[in-house]
Amino acid sequence: MTDFAAMKLYDGGRAPNPRRVQIFMAEKGIDIPRVQVDINKLEQRSPEFTRINPMQRLPVLVLEDGTVISETVAICRYIEEVQPEPPLMGRDARDRAIVEMWQRRMELQLLLPVGWAFRHLHPGGAHLESPQIAQLGTVSQQRAREFMEFLDTELADRPFVAGDAFTIADITGVITFQFLKPARIPFPEDLAHVSRWYREVAARPSVMQ
Amino acid sequence: MTDFAAMKLYDGGRAPNPRRVQIFMAEKGIDIPRVQVDINKLEQRSPEFTRINPMQRLPVLVLEDGTVISETVAICRYIEEVQPEPPLMGRDARDRAIVEMWQRRMELQLLLPVGWAFRHLHPGGAHLESPQIAQLGTVSQQRAREFMEFLDTELADRPFVAGDAFTIADITGVITFQFLKPARIPFPEDLAHVSRWYREVAARPSVMQ
C-alpha cells in the first residue's frame, strides 16, 4: 500500500500545471499533503524552493525517501504506477502509446502555444517571460486555433481525446481551454465537437473543484 | 513475442526526432521495416503522409493492426513495453518518474530551444517556421546555454542524465548536442562534466550508426 500521506506536494494553486496534478489526484480518489507556493509572489524563485527544484517550476512531488519529482507528467506517471485504478494513462501497451501520443499533442500543440500567447502578450506574463515577444504571442494564438480545428475533426467520432476513456490527455486539454481567456484566444464556440467535449469534461467533479 | 517485422516505421533520416527512435531501437537490439520520408523535400506534407499523420511530423510507427502512433516518445514507450530489456525508461515506479522528469527537462528546456534557434535563425528553417522570429531564435540560444550550465552541475556526480544508467534522457540529450551547429550555438567546451558525458554517449554504437 502506498502511503500518500508520507509524501509532500509543492502546489501552485490555480496555475495550469498544478491544476493538472490536482485533477489527476481527484480522479484517482487520492490526496497528498500540500505545501502552497505562491506563484503570484514568485515564491517558486526563492532560494528555499530553488534548492528543491532548480528549474523553479511547480508542481513538485517529494516522496517518502526524499526523492524529488518535478514535471507534471512525471508526477502523474508516478501516481498512475502506484495507484493504477482508474487508469488515466492507458490500459495496455497499445493504449498507453495512444494516450501518450495525444497527451503530447495536447501539450506541445495546444498548451504550449496557449501558454506562450499569455506569457508574450499579457501584462501578467512580463515577469515570467523576458523579453516578451509580441509576434510570438500572435503566431501562437493562430497555432492554437489551428490545432483546435484539427481536434474538432478528431472528436467527431469519439467521446474523449484519446478514445473511449477519460485520460490525462483530456486533463491537459481542459486546463488549457480554461486558460484561453488570459491568453486572449476566443473560446471556439463554432467548433461543435470540441464544445461538446469541453462541456462534458469541464463538468466533472475533479475539474470543478 | 512481438513481431517487429510486421510493423512499419515512417522514418525521417538524420533529423533529430527520427534519430531518437533509431538510437532507441539500436539500444534495444531491434529493427522495424522503414519507409523513408524525405524531410528536405517536405514529403511529410504530402496528402498521402498527411492521411497517416495529420500533424505532418516524423517519425510515425504503424502497428500490425494498423494503429498509428506518432510522437517520438510515444513510439519509444511502446517499444519499451513490448521489449523491456535493456530498460531505457526506468526499472521501477520511482526510477521511471525520475527518467520521465529528466527526459522532459532535456526535451522542453534544451531540445525545444535548440530547435527554435535553428528554425528561427537558419535559412534552412524558413520552410519549417513561418514567420521566422529572429528575436526568439536569439533568446532560445541563450536559454539553451543556461540549461547546459545547469546540466553541468548535475552531471558532476553521476555518469548519465537520469542517474547510473543510460536512458532516453541521454538519447534526447545527445541528438540535441549534435544539432547545436545548425542552431549556431557553440559546443560548451568549457563545461567539463557535460563535455565528458557527451564524449561518452556520442561514442556508443547506437549513436555512431
Image (spheres, coloured by chain):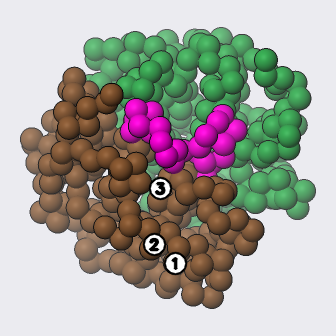
Chain colours: A green, B brown
* SS for callout 1: helix
Q: Residues within 10 Å of mark 1 (few under 14, many from 20)?
A: few
Residue bounds of the magenta highlight = B77-102
Label 1 belongs to which residue? B199
Q: Amino acid at mark 1?
A: Arg
Q: Are marks 2 and 1 in contact (CB under 8 Å)?
A: yes
The image's mark for residue A137 is 3
State the CA–CA distance, disc 2 to disc 1.
Answer: 5 Å
Label 2 belongs to which residue? B202
Q: Quadrant of residue A59?
A: top right
Q: Quadrant of residue A72?
A: top right
Q: Amino acid at mark 3?
A: Gly
Q: Is residue B91 magenta?
A: yes
**Chain of the residue that carries numbered disc 3 in the rendered image:** A
State the CA–CA distance, disc 2 to disc 3.
Answer: 37 Å
Is B49 on the left-hand or right-hand side of B30?
left
* SS for callout 2: helix
Task: Please give the name of the residue rendered at 89% of the width and 29% of the height, measured from the top-left corner.
Answer: A6
In the rendered image, residue A159, in percent from the top left (x then y), is placed at 39, 13
Decide which of B55, A177 is in the foreground and name it. Answer: B55
